[in-house]
Image (cartoon, rainbow, N blue to C red):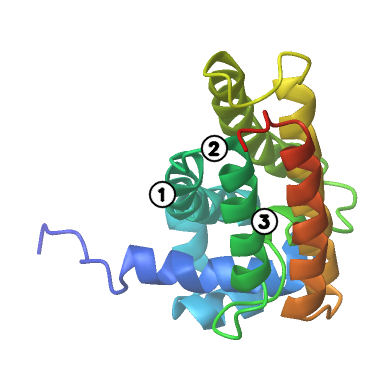
Amino acid sequence: MGMGRPREFDAELALDQAMEVFWRHGYEGATIAQLTEAMGINPPSLYACFGNKEGLLKAALDRYTRLRNIWMDEVVAAPTARAVAERMLMGIADRQTDPANPPGCLLVQGGIACGTGSENVPFELAARRAQNEDQLRDRFVRARAEGDLKESADPAALARYVSAVSVGMGVMASSGADREALRQVASVAVQAVEAQSVDRT
């Protein structure tokens, strides 16, 4: 008829479904059959839209990152460095044990056990985690400039520490740790950030 076939699926919904499969099974463990079934499409449609499995992962990560960035903007808007760490880590404890989502974090789970042919995946995930660390570092730089953090505080090291704790919490959540266990870890980490803060009492 001279007209292309209309898309038969909602792209954002399909990416949400693919994101959940990668989140639950990791890149290596997620099969094309699982992905296409979850997305409601056939393999030729997947390849036509995304090129290959890695292309689909990147598209799903783009959507996950957009959603996470909205949340990170709320995190770094907290009034103090301590409040930033608390909002982030307590939020992670709640979000990563929410039964509405797979446990843990896609940016951690997605790259577990990648083998030959998927060596780029862990680097892709690490780059996206680094974006969050950069946001924290910039916020802690501002906190030190505003006199909220001590002059001796190292914003880059502090951001790396909070990021490392968040990744560890993701591993714990994916291994079955409950919300209370994650909140305990978050509480100790928040105290570490507070120790670098200027005492205003």
Query: For numbered disc 2, what is the local secondary structure?
Result: loop
Count of numbered labels shown in the rendering = 3
Nearer to the camera, 38 or 70: 70
Q: Which residue matches tag 2?
A: 80
Q: Residue at x 38, y 71 (%)?
A: 13
Can you say which quadrant of the picture contains the C terminus?
Answer: top right
- Residue 22: % across, % down: 66, 66
State how far apart marks 2 and 1 are (Cα). Answer: 19 Å
State how far apart marks 3 and 1 are (Cα). Answer: 16 Å
- Residue 85: % across, % down: 64, 46
Q: Which mark identifies residue 70? A: 1
Q: For the residue marked with disc 2, what is the amino acid? A: Thr
Q: Residue at x 58, y 77 (%)?
A: 101
Residue 67 lies, with reference to residue 73, above or below; the image says below
Between label 2 and label 1, give the one nearer the viewer. Answer: 2
> Would you say residue 29 is visible in this rendering?
no
Q: Residue at x 60, y 19 (%)?
A: 141
Q: Which badge, 3 or 1, is on the more N-terminal residue?
A: 1
Q: Which residue matches tag 3?
A: 89
Can you say which quadrant of the picture contains the N terminus?
Answer: bottom left
Nearer to the camera, 89 or 164: 89
Q: Residues within 10 Å of mark 1 (few under 14, many from 20)?
A: few
